Amino acid sequence: MSEHDHDLHNVAPGEPHDTMLSETVSYVVGLGLALLLTGISFWVASTSSLWGPGVAVGLVVLAIAQMGVHLVFFLHITSGPDNTNNVLALAFGVLIVFLVMIGTIWIMAHMNTNMGPSPEMMNLMTQRG
Amino acid sequence: MSSNEATAIGFTHGGSEDTGLGHRGPESKSIVVPYGFWLFVLSDMILFSALFATYASLANATDGGPVTNQLFDRTNVAIETMALLISSFVCGLAMIAAKRRNMAWTQGWLALTALLGLVFLAIEIREFVGMIRIGAGPQRSAFLSAFFTLVGCHGAHVTAGLMWIGTMMAQLWAKGFQPHIVRRLLCLSVFWHALDIIWVAIFTIVYLIGTLP
């Protein structure tokens, strides 16, 4: 019974794990990876040896990777069975975040191109000005 | 209510059929409270996603005023990023010490966390003041309104986090490692790590992409 219960156990997000060594190693590895990704981001942004139009996309990918590092090594969100509830909540949050951001940017960019002031409007504005 | 009655009216699942829910009752507070706080943090990220979407839509609406390349300084941003990242790391160390009920180390690491957060905030406020002084305040253009709302909202969160760290240090000092204090500490660390995650998005989208040649 108690063994069975252990399988279904939940952990809180951000809860450190068992031994002091493995906890510290987790944070140090996380810090190292985050520093590395931050360093690459700043390098990618300042170098001229990369293909210009791809740089912004590359930076976004690096940022998402770094957020993943923070989630795994600092907030201890894992794929283990004890973490299912945390992961599901996170997945729903990420879904909404992407819907809001991509939806807004997509729609607003189209409105910006397609709904500029018509020639008559421009004419009126120049007359008034 | 006896267990026979409970079985008869369907409150239990019976021995062989285990759905994985229910028969143990709700989780303990040490799980439920941080989980609820995790939901708050995720909703906070959704709030920030709306501000990011606003910023991305308005980043070019400068109304003839200053543009991103003229305003942002990468060195400043690099220092801010380091301060907040190391602060997040040190906050993790504080949690490790707190789990061992070590008062001196917990307080020490928390103080360092707050100090690094203060460094971050000081640089950010200096940047804001400098921008407003050269006429690039939030009322100058839609781009600057969106910028001050997004980055300022993050700054406000950091300020709230700093006050929370101070409160937790005092509570820890006065009450010791009682279960409810440890729960609050765990929530604080989740909050602080989440602020660093949002900062990663800000320094990439606002500062690095904004200062591309």
Image (cartoon, rainbow, N blue to C red):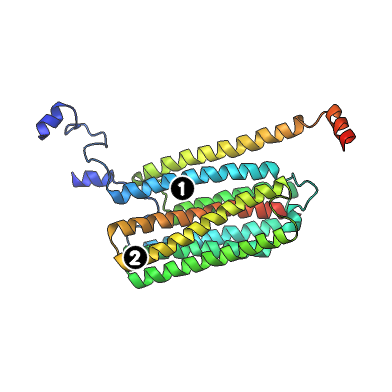
Of pointers 2 and 1, the one earlier in the residue sequence:
1
Query: A24 above or below B137?
Result: below
Q: Which mark is residue A80?
A: none
Looking at the rendered structure, the secondary structure element under dot 2 is: helix
Q: Which residue is mark 1?
A: B41
Amino acid at the residue labelled 2 = Leu
Looking at the rendered structure, the secondary structure element under dot 1 is: helix
Query: B54 above or below B140?
Result: above
Q: Residues within 10 Å of mark 1 (few under 14, many from 20)?
A: many
- Residue B65: x percent and y percent? 78, 51
- Are marks 2 and 1 in one subunit? yes
Image quadrant assignment for residue B99? bottom left
Q: Residue furthest right?
A: A127
A91 or B122, which lies in front?
B122
Tell me the quadrant of the picture where the N terminus of chain B can be found: top left
Say which chain tag 1 marks. Answer: B
Q: Residue placed at 58% from the left, 61% from the top? A: B81
Amino acid at the residue labelled 1 = Val
Q: Determine whether, in the image, residue A73 is placed left or right of residue B75.
A: left
Q: Determine whether, in the image, residue A7 is placed left or right of residue B3.
A: right
Q: Which residue is mark 2?
A: B172
